[in-house]
Image (spheres, rainbow, N blue to C red):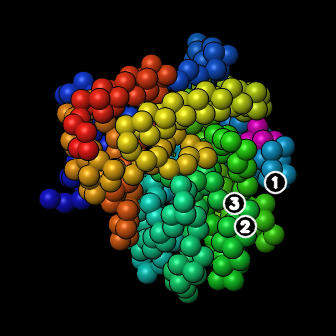
Amino acid sequence: MSRASETSIFTEMTELAHRTGAVNLGQGVPELDSPPVLLAEVAQAVLDGRNQYPPAIGVPALREAVAAHQRARYGLEYAPGDEVLVTTGATEALASACLGLTGPGDEIVTFDPCYDAYPAGARLSGARLVPVPLAIDGDGFVLDSDALRAAVNGRTRLLVLNSPHNPTGKVFTPDELERIAEICREHDVTVVTDEVYEHLVYDGARHVPIATLPGMRERTLTVSSAGKTFNVTGWKVGWVTGPAHLVAVVGSVKQWLTYTSGAPYQEALARALGAVEGWAAGLRRTLTAHRDLLAAGLEEAGLSPYRADAGYFLQADIRPWGFTDGLRFCRELPLRAGVVAIPTSAFQQGVDTTPWLVRFSFCRRERSLADAVDRFAALTASRPEGA
């Protein structure tokens, strides 16, 4: 069977959830509300006829809002005219960067486990993806500087950095970012940084864009989107910021992919982005409570969750249940407990040293998470002691 015709683990688990009636904590599709004002403004934009092609680089209001956001939040200055590009979601920005900046014989470095769009982008461009495993330290994940340095060489064209990180929930620390930046400066590597979870950071952790570090703005393309921040993943509105010559490369590819999209969404999102801080603070409170509810339920069930400082997901160690194979565990879990998860092996591109990790999503309604926790509790209560 070819790679193109294989059924993805996400499709398999979603079908299993439907078939068994399990609570689906597999995919990162939020069940949470969006800002009512934003929804009303989009509806009005549709009724007002804002339904034709917007400019290929994005409507001016959204490009200006993105530039203002980067300036106010991070102190990064970008010119809306040629250093900001609106894309059809973050995924298009990532794919366009890979296609525009790499080709056969080049290498793209990223951290393992990783979001599955990164290896897909490398395959599209003909480049080789070089995964650098994150190390486990206590209940969290950390940078292995030696492994990164060993991976970067004269063929390395891009480093794809995802912080806050999916699927681990890790936020790279300022010290880790400086070590990454040092290697990139030394080898003249361009960084594409995926920051779609930038507003979803918890417990006092702080997201620092690598573009803010000395010598990095000129070699960094920063990608983000509205989907995770406003719970509108289906709208597929993203953006990329960076030096004009790098943004132009992304735009030269993007024009032959979607050309443009999302006309009624873009102007409404421009206004929403200008008022994002208050909305995001409330969303963080909700997601923190949901994360803690799920973590407590996993712990009570005997599974061992890892710390999630950001994003939508908890990693859990399944070995206390006698499993070492995450895929087998996830295939059996809907029948055992009525809950669906995703094996972390689905995100591993190199040697899988943690096949006993699985990923649970907490971007669901509170009642969905409470239902999952109750199902774990019922299974735990019915298991023979020591089983």
**Distance from label 3 to label 1 (Cα)?**
19 Å
In the image, farthest residue toward the bottom: 154
The reply to whether callout 1 and callout 2 are in contact (CB within 8 Å) is no
Q: Is residue 353 magenta?
A: no
The kind of residue on which mark 2 rests is Asp
* Observer-nearest of 166 and 217: 166
- Left or right: residue 1 compared with residue 273: left
Disc on res. 184 = none
Spatial CA distance of label 2 from label 3 is 5 Å
How many angstroms separate mark 1 from mark 2 (CA)? 19 Å
Residue for point 49% across, 35% down: 296
Please report contact status of discs 3 and 1: CB closer than 8 Å, yes or no. no
**Which mark, by number, is residue 76?**
1
Q: Which residue is mark 3?
A: 173
What residue sits right under mark 2 in the picture? 175
Residue 28 falls left or right of residue 17:
right
Q: Quadrant of residue 382?
A: top left
Report which quarter residue 120 is drawn in: bottom left
